[in-house]
Image (cartoon, rainbow, N blue to C red):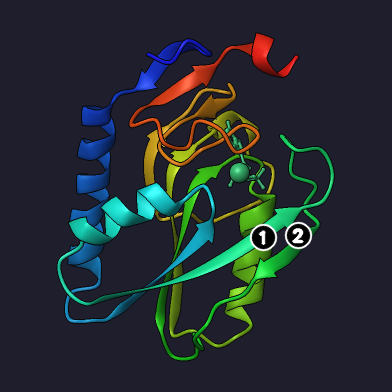
Amino acid sequence: MHSDLTEILFDTDEIAASVKRLGAEISRDYAGKTILLVTVLKGAFVFMADLARSIEGDVEVDFMAVSSYGAEAKSSGVVRIIKDLEASVAGRHVIIVEDILDSGLTLKYLLKNISSRGPHSIEVATLLHKKERQQADIRCKYVGLICPDEFVVGYGLDYGERYRNLPYIGILDPKIYS
Ligand code: IMP
Ligand code: MG
């Protein structure tokens, strides 16, 4: 375990099992359709790579990068698009892929923004859900793992751009950010 963590919350096997389950659900729900996975950079890049490979059938990927104004660890709900999608989503079956649903404010903005571009359907897949903290009313169909209200890193998730490469998800020692 990385020495900046206090514990491993989800190990590699637990994450893999969860992603496999989501992939099976999505494969079943979208049988015969082409899915467009819209990945929210940067945190969701690892999850998306594994999720895409666990889906049977046709999958395309595109990327969006957003930033929330305000404090680094908290979302303000005011979102700025840093990188937009390359392709049109009109008429497509879109699944927004997120690393973690925390307050839900980022996803609320993304859902509204992408919905306005005329997709055929739109759903959300998140690897982690901090259930206790969700403020915004988000319909998230595909949830991987329920996460306690702790600051977690690894498997794409960062603190100050670090720890994204850890193959597991752990709780960051509060000493690191206090
Ligand atoms: P929301 O708008 O509050 O739902 O913010 C979601 C975004 O905040 C995620 O996509 C992450 O980038 C970031 N975030 C929230 N909680 C954590 C965490 O525990 N570790 C790392 N990033 C987090
Ligand atoms: Mg982040």
Q: Amino acid at mark 1?
A: Val
Above-or-below relation of 15 to 97: above
Q: Position of residue 121 (x, y in %)?
A: 43, 78
Q: Earlier in the sequence, mark 1 or mark 2?
A: 1
Could you tell whether 114 is left or right of 9 in the image?
right
Q: Position of residue 60 (x, y in %)?
A: 33, 76
- What residue would you read off at disc 1? 66
Q: Residue at x 53, y 13 (%)?
A: 4
- What residue would you read off at disc 2? 79
- Say if mark 1 contacts mark 2, CB within 8 Å: yes
Could you tell whether 56 is left or right of 101 in the image?
left
User: Is residue 151 or residue 93 the one in the foreground?
Assistant: 151
Q: Position of residue 71 (x, y in %)?
A: 81, 38
| Helix, strand or loop status at disc 2 | strand
| Helix, strand or loop status at disc 1 | strand
Give neighbour class at mark 2: few <14, some 14-19, many 20+ (Cα, 10 Å).
some
